[in-house]
Image: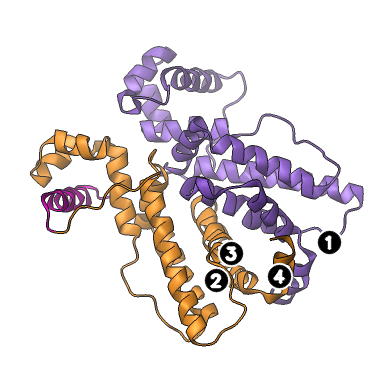
Chain colours: A purple, B orange
């Protein structure tokens, strides 16, 4: 569950990671997954297979590492002027991306690794993004803000559950329901009572 | 996302599934996962590799199918006399099992398959179990019962999210918080307003 040390940018380790990730992206068209092998990836990346085995251990762990990198949000968080809309945009983009074919594959790769590292990174990113949205809301003077945990458990968790278990049950209405419920002041006292 | 037809009990298809699942369980000690191959499993199960490829397509899908079968609850749902405690016992057992090493592996296998079938089955089982707990509560005369969706999204989803992303953050207190919040009548009106 501990993070692997991040490679120094520009260091050899970083260049190897970049080359190997690029090779996986180039060779993995989502089809014929079963044909993908570490020697194939190593040749395409210009490294030795043992370099890959040493660093990632197995193809499955490598695919999870590449998937986690893909799951890392690129676009800066949009600032809509309200926490509710910020959350709707953020979760809406995640929903749209994760219900796409490549998104479903990346999710399965990240969730399918024996190591927690890829998921721990996704969790950390999601917490960071929520923290940013909360601090913006605080700066705007929005009050009775929920905790990061409440937003992870109330929005990201059911979203991820349904993306992986029942994507056809997802809808913007459902998403709005989660967001409002997580922000719902009606629940604040109740929550305060049991915490 | 459609279910594979369940093999007729006692039929050839069922016997093949049983033999192959047993072979995976026997050969997969959780260690040396990377050594596990379909020909190895086929030999141990007394079937041809092509039988396995035809039916499961890949090792990854086979492991997911075996994992889903492991995730299917065996013990009958305990009836504690209240929905809150029924949910606590049910979710508590899931938490305990899924944070164990074999549980984490089974979870990763089930969540890591490209096919939705294993996860759809887990989702169906969880909905069935919740439906049973709700009907018991109804028979006991408990009122203002939440929907199955509310309990999936409010309890199982955050539990599964933290089991796979941040198991160290799990605790019985947190579980109790989710259960009470999902049952919390303080939220009912709020929810009613937006549905």
| Circles 3 and 1 on the same subunit | no
Q: Which residue is mark 1?
A: A144
Q: Which residue is mark 2?
A: B172
- Residue B24 in the image: state x and y as whole percent: 21, 48
User: Whole-Å distance between the Cαs marked 2 and 1?
Assistant: 26 Å
User: Whole-Å distance between the Cαs marked 4 and 1?
Assistant: 16 Å
Q: Is residue B42 or residue B2 the one in the foreground?
A: B2
Question: Which span is picked out in magenta?
Answer: B10-30
- Residue A123 in the image: state x and y as whole percent: 60, 46
Q: Which mark is residue B187?
A: 4
Which image quadrant for residue B46? top left
User: What secondary structure is found at the residue carrying circle 4?
Assistant: helix
| Circles 2 and 3 on the same subunit | yes
Determine crowd level at label 4: few under 14, some 14-19, many 20+ residues with C-alpha closer than 10 A: some
Quadrant placement of the C terminus of chain A: bottom right
Q: On the rendered structure, is A77 left or right of B23?
A: right
Q: Which residue is mark 3?
A: B150
Determine crowd level at label 1: few under 14, some 14-19, many 20+ residues with C-alpha closer than 10 A: few
């Amino acid at each position: 569950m501990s993070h692997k040390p991040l490679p120094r940018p520009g260091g050899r380790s970083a260049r190897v990671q970049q080359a190997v990730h690029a090779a996986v992206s180039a060779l993995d068209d989502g089809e014929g997954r079963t044909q993908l092998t570490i020697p194939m990836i190593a040749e395409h990346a210009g490294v030795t297979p043992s370099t890959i085995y040493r660093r990632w251990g197995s193809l499955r762990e490598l695919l999870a590492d590449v998937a986690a990198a893909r799951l890392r949000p690129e676009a800066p968080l949009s600032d809509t002027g309200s926490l509710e809309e910020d959350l709707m945009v953020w979760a809406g983009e995640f929903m749209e991306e994760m219900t796409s074919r490549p998104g479903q594959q990346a999710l399965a790769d990240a969730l399918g690794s024996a190591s927690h590292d890829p998921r721990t990174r996704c969790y950390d990113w999601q917490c960071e993004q929520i923290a940013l949205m909360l601090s913006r809301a605080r700066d705007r003077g929005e009050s009775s803000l929920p905790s990061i945990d409440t937003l992870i458990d109330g929005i990201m968790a059911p979203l991820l559950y349904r993306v992986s278990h029942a994507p056809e049950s997802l809808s913007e209405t459902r998403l709005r329901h989660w967001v409002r419920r997580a922000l719902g002041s009606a629940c604040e006292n109740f929550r305060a009572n049991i915490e």
